[in-house]
Amino acid sequence: VKDDQVYIDERAVIWGERAGEGLDVTVPVLVRGQHQFPFRFNIPETNLPCSFESRACYIRYFVKVTIDIPYASPPQGIKYFTIIGPHIDCMDEQYLKPVSGQDKKVKCCLCCAKGPVTLSCSLDRTAFCCGETLKLKSMIDNQGEEAVKLKVRLVQYCEFFVERGVLGVNKEVQHLVLEYKGETVVPNERQDTCANLRIPTVPTTMMGVCRLAQIYYTLV
């Protein structure tokens, strides 16, 4: 099952003339030698999905050049380029609100419950740029009988959709972006940490831009 979506499809003749429909135009002959022809294409100001490569889906941007040679196979050249986007302002007010979460785990042996292990985590905001340091504050209160350790993973979720029939076809792929392991917390001990996680170069979050794919990230 395959599908595609085209965002940019601009064409131009940078030397010679294009034969119009129903017109007989003589194609000029380019003399032997080295030639340079300047050209320009304007990238739309609308949000374009970022360049992306995976087994299930790819988003590619390229410039393709074709030389028209009568009665011969036209030589072609292709050059790929990268689009970084869509643009997200990490300092926008909607992303500056702190976010926090808490979880508690209790182990049981037969009918006897052991002491709980409590985890609390918080971030000062919810949007970050590639290369930026994400500061994750955490608190572990280990009242259990076994040593525990904080493990954090930044996971990239890629969802793909193909419109076929009523429901269509969808697929989800996960990629591990980075992983952090904290120090061991022994029983009856409380530990407060601030982990600095440097975000590597990855495609930006892409939601509602492409009808075939979307990308988002979560901390687990």
Image (cartoon, helix red, strand yellow):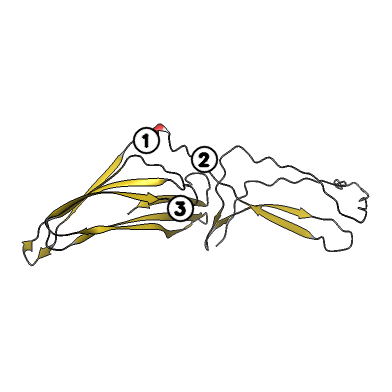
- Would you say the residues marked 2 and 1 are in contact, meaning their CB atoms lie under 8 Å apart? no
On residue 96, which mark appears?
Answer: 1
On residue 180, which mark appears?
Answer: none
The residue sitting at 39% across, 55% down in the picture is: 155
Give the alpha-carbon distance from disc 2 to disc 3, as whole Å. 17 Å
Q: Is residue 169 above or below residue 210?
A: below
Picture coordinates of residue 118, whole percent (x, y): 18, 52
The residue sitting at 59% across, 47% down in the picture is: 83
The residue sitting at 35% across, 49% down in the picture is: 196
In this view, the residue in front, 194 or 165, is 194
Give the alpha-carbon distance from disc 1 to disc 3, as whole Å. 21 Å
Q: Residue flagged by tag 3: what amino acid is it?
A: Pro
Q: Residue flagged by tag 1: what amino acid is it?
A: Leu
Q: Is residue 103 above or below residue 145?
A: above
Q: Earlier in the sequence, mark 2 or mark 1?
A: 2
Image check: 22 left or right of 12? right
Q: Earlier in the sequence, mark 1 or mark 3?
A: 1
- Return the residue at label 2: 87
Say few, some or many: other residues with alpha carbon within 10 Å of mark 3 (under 14 / 14 to 19 / 20 or more).
few
Q: Earlier in the sequence, mark 2 or mark 3?
A: 2
The residue sitting at 89% across, 62% down in the picture is: 71
Image check: 55 left or right of 188? right
On residue 200, which mark appears?
Answer: 3
Locate the C terminus by quadrant: bottom left
